[in-house]
Image: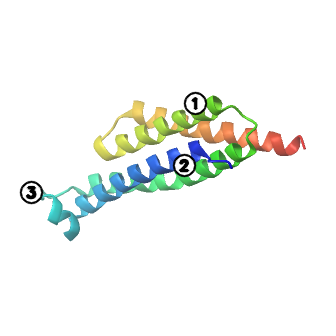
């Protein structure tokens, strides 16, 4: 039985980070649920709210496709665990860096650019790898 350890582990990690981003949006919007947990003392600027919404949205746009690619490659079981792990860690850095940039900084070009480059690189590598495997059949 295949356990899909990488897909399971990264899915769990991404799910928790997604919840963190979701709760942050709720807090910034002044959600009644968040007001029960946290005291809201300040008015949140619309620009800050919009940046956090994009951090959340961008995360939710890229993570599912990556997890599907990882699952496909892990299911095939033809690549080394370490190879899949390294690419998954690069992707994780990319998503965390980008989300942190948008959620906590007005501007941080290093986090934004490195985050997107790592995201594109990881999805590209997995996409090309899967395509190559299909075309070699």
Count up the numbered dots: 3
Helix, strand or loop status at disc 3: loop
C-alpha span from label 2 to label 3: 39 Å
Q: Earlier in the sequence, mark 3 or mark 1?
A: 3
Residue 25 visible in the snapshot: yes
Residue at 12% of width from left, 59% of height from top?
A: 40
Helix, strand or loop status at disc 1: helix
Q: On the image, numbered disc 3 is attached to which residue?
A: 41
Residue at 72% of width from left, 34% of height from top?
A: 79
Residue 130 image offset from top left, x and y in percent:
75, 43
Residue 129 image offset from top left, x and y in percent:
74, 38
Residue 57 image offset from top left, x and y in percent:
44, 56
Numbered badge on residue 15: none
Furthest residue to the right? 137
Q: Earlier in the sequence, mark 2 or mark 1?
A: 2
Q: Quadrant of residue 112?
A: top left
Furthest residue to the bottom? 32
Q: On the image, numbered disc 1 is attached to which residue?
A: 86
Q: On the image, numbered disc 2 is attached to which residue?
A: 8
C-alpha span from label 2 to label 1: 16 Å
Q: Is residue 56 above or below residue 85?
A: below
Q: Nearer the viewer, residue 126 or 98?
A: 126
Q: Residues within 10 Å of mark 1 (few under 14, many from 20)?
A: few
Quarter containing the C terminus? top right
Helix, strand or loop status at disc 2: helix
Furthest residue to the front? 1
C-alpha span from label 3 to label 1: 42 Å
């Amino acid at each position: 039985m295949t356990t899909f350890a990488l897909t399971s582990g990264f899915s769990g990690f991404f799910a928790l980070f997604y919840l963190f981003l979701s709760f942050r949006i709720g807090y910034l919007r002044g959600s009644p649920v968040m007001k029960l947990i946290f005291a809201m003392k300040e008015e949140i600027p619309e620009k800050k709210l919009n940046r956090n919404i994009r951090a959340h949205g961008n995360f939710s746009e890229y993570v599912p496709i990556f997890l599907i690619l990882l699952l496909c490659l892990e299911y095939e079981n033809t690549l080394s665990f370490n190879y899949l792990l390294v690419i998954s860690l690069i992707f994780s850095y990319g998503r965390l860096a980008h989300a942190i940039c948008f959620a906590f900084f007005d501007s941080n070009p290093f986090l934004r650019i490195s985050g997107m480059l790592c995201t594109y690189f990881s999805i590209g590598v997995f996409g090309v790898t899967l395509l190559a495997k299909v075309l070699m059949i």
